């Protein structure tokens, strides 16, 4: 799980009793989790990993899908309690 460990419970706690998200969610998914070093004019692009951020660490595709499923489950659970 890496970068997203612990995000699911935090997101679930941000849901109101009506199932509405009480804070914005900005996720930055990439195909490959993490980040890699890139310095214009210095880094050989051929050594970069396709689908991995060159700016800041991001969650990967699989973790993004899991996170969205967790959030959807939390919304459904909250709505079912109404």
Image (cartoon, rainbow, N blue to C red):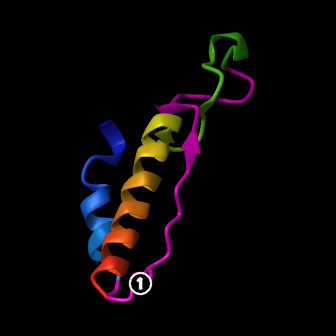
Residue 2 placement (x, y as % from top left): 31, 37
Please determine whether, in this image, residue 73 is positioned above or below residue 33: below
Quadrant of the rendered image containing residue 66: top left
Quadrant of the rendered image containing residue 21: bottom left
Q: Residue at x 70, y 10 (%)?
A: 46
Residue 25 drawn in magenta: yes
Q: Quadrant of the N terminus?
A: top left
Please determine whether, in this image, residue 31 is positioned above or below residue 64: above
| Crowd tier of the residue under label 1, counting other residues whose Cα lies within 10 Å: few below 14, some 14–19, many 20 or above | few
Q: Which residues are magenta?
A: 16-42
User: Could one spot residue 67 in this view of the protein?
Assistant: yes
Relative to 44, 60 lies left or right: left
Q: Quadrant of the C terminus?
A: bottom left
Q: Under tag 1, what secondary structure?
A: loop
What secondary structure is the magenta-colored segment mainly?
Answer: loop
Quadrant of the rendered image containing residue 78: bottom left
User: Could one spot residue 14 in this view of the protein?
Assistant: no
Front residue of 15 and 23: 15
Residue 60 placement (x, y as % from top left): 49, 36
Residue 45 placement (x, y as % from top left): 71, 17
Q: Residue at x 34, y 67 (%)?
A: 74
Residue pushed farthest right? 41
- Name the residue that disc number 1 marks: 22
């Amino acid at each position: 799980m890496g970068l997203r460990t612990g995000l699911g419970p935090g997101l679930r706690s941000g849901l109101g009793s009506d199932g509405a998200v009480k804070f914005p969610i900005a996720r930055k998914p990439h195909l490959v989790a993490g980040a890699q070093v890139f310095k214009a004019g210095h880094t050989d692009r051929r050594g970069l990993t396709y689908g991995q951020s060159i700016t800041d660490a991001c969650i990967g595709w699989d973790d993004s899908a899991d996170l969205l499923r967790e959030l959807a489950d939390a919304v459904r659970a909250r709505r079912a309690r109404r």
